[in-house]
Image (tube, grey):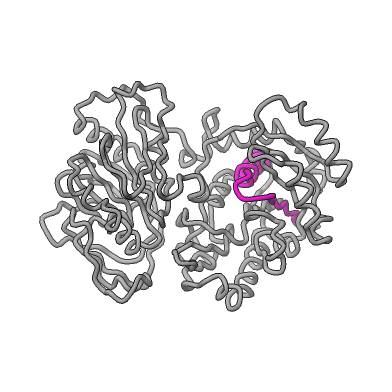
Amino acid sequence: MTTPTLLVAGTASHVGKSTVAAGLCRLFDDRGLSVAPFKAQNMSNNARAVATADGDGFGEIGVSQYVQARAARVAPTTDHNPVLLKPHGDGASQLVVHGRAAGLNTASDYYATHWEDARKAAVESHRRLASEADVVVAEGAGSIAEINLHDRDLANIETARFADAEVLLAADIERGGVFASLLGTLELLPEDVRDRVVGAVITKFRGDPSLLEPGVDAIEERTGVPVLGVLPYDDPGLPEEDSLALPAAGERATVGDDDGVAAEHAVTIGVPRLPRISNATDFDPLSETPGVRVAYLPLDATLDGVDGVVLPGSKNTVDDLLALRDAGFDDELAGFDGPVVGICGGYQLLGERIENADIEGSGDDETVAGLGLLPIVTRFSRDKRVEPVSVEFDGAGPLAGATGTVDGYEIHMGDSRIVGGATPVSGDGAALGSVAGTYIHDLFANDAPRNAFVDAIYESAGRDRPATTTGTAGADADADEPGAGDPYDRAAALVADNLDVAALCDSLGLEE
């Protein structure tokens, strides 16, 4: 008997596929099954550095498959997400296959030139995973009913076919029209894939589920597909897969202001909403810290009311630098006297200049002036550094006092060197005065640098920091540590309590 695959597909983007898949990964693992998460093709600038499937170094996968591997208690590898598209701007994306960058392509170039190779890579990865697991939990992408893409829909239609997968269809009731979405999606599926749908799940419901019963009965009678569950609106605390959860460019949004700390005892960290922002999950541990609000700022916003600033990573540092300058954020930042930290691309932005800038496809100018807040020079190259890191951290500037082991990862093109009187910071970083930068993503998931930065902000703002515990709950905590606050266990409970898992197991040939 071949290893069964369950494809969690959706009627649209952002319907809860990642949460359902992660919950099933943990639930199946809790029941003694060996689980392999899988997403044939992902599109996201939120990535993680993991071991390559061939064991020869490290590569990138989307954050959702990293999270699902943690949920399944398996070491994440590039097989879990063999094809990753990282949007670069102007209709182009960087293609990453089996964890390694394979060039910059428009959508038409990708489908015309690279799609067959991408499909081959996905089939190879699924075959390896299935050979070692009891069950594969695959996640689709966007809507499975995009009829314009059915001949090249790698994450949905092709996965259902080459993996011989059963399909669980997720539909989000919060956006309205959930029954129309289910019916329309099923009607638009190719017949062979439609026959693979073993059930549907309605997500993000607020209220009494019994109110849905007439609609559920009707949709089951019309389609013959059982609705296996209604999941209440709940956020287990898993990292967001992409920037869809962030405010759109030009809008402002604040997170972390629901912690019960009075406004006069809180501080606000401003994060400019770069058009090509990447790895925005770097800031989740800050917004989860009591007393800290993270405000995502339009580039033309002032820093009035902001106590500290973090410059985020970017998929296209040069274009985002030019966008900052065009909006006047460079002048705003130059006049800011609070603590400032740049992460990866944000660190590069803070320097005096960027050399070989045309490598990013941003124009003919080889050298672009940076924001000039740190005496560093960054030189781009086509080589990309992708690896998890564990360093004995030695902080300075707004990270002063942060010591001890810090775990994170690096994903970047280019290297930076100090050219002035800055103090070195771990992660090939630098600090001068109240400004610091580093290449280490997930920096603030570590207690020491997070608390050092927050302490520096409170001191600069002249406020007393409220007494808190040093740690934060979150999906980068120990994946094997059970408890009500563990996001993987919460996702599993959400699924177990509201989905007919026995029916799913029966359709997959698994013992419940």
Q: Residue at x 28, y 52 (%)?
A: 438
Question: Quadrant where the C terminus lies?
Answer: top right
Question: Quadrant where the N terminus lies?
Answer: bottom right
**In which image quadrant can residue 154 be found?**
bottom right
Q: Which residues are magenta?
A: 3-30
**In which image quadrant can residue 236 be found?**
top right
Instruction: Point out the residue furthest to the bottom here.
Output: 113
Q: Residue at x 53, y 38 (%)?
A: 480
Q: Residue at x 14, y 45 (%)?
A: 433
Image height check: is 20 above or below 104? above
Along the line of sight, the residue nearer the viewer: 224 or 49: 224
Q: Residue 20: say if magenta.
A: yes
Where residue 23 sits in the image (x, y, percent)? Answer: 63, 40
Along the line of sight, the residue nearer the viewer: 211 or 328: 328
Along the line of sight, the residue nearer the viewer: 324 or 419: 324
Q: How many marks?
A: 0
Instruction: Point out the residue furthest to the left here.
Output: 421
Judge from the rendering whether residue 15 lies leftward or rightward of residue 247; answer left or right.
Answer: right
Judge from the rendering whether residue 204 lies leftward or rightward of residue 380; answer left or right.
Answer: right
Where residue 489 sits in the image (x, y, percent)? Answer: 59, 34
Q: Residue 174: say if magenta.
A: no
| Residue 356 shows in this picture | yes
Where residue 382 sits in the image (x, y, percent)? Answer: 37, 73
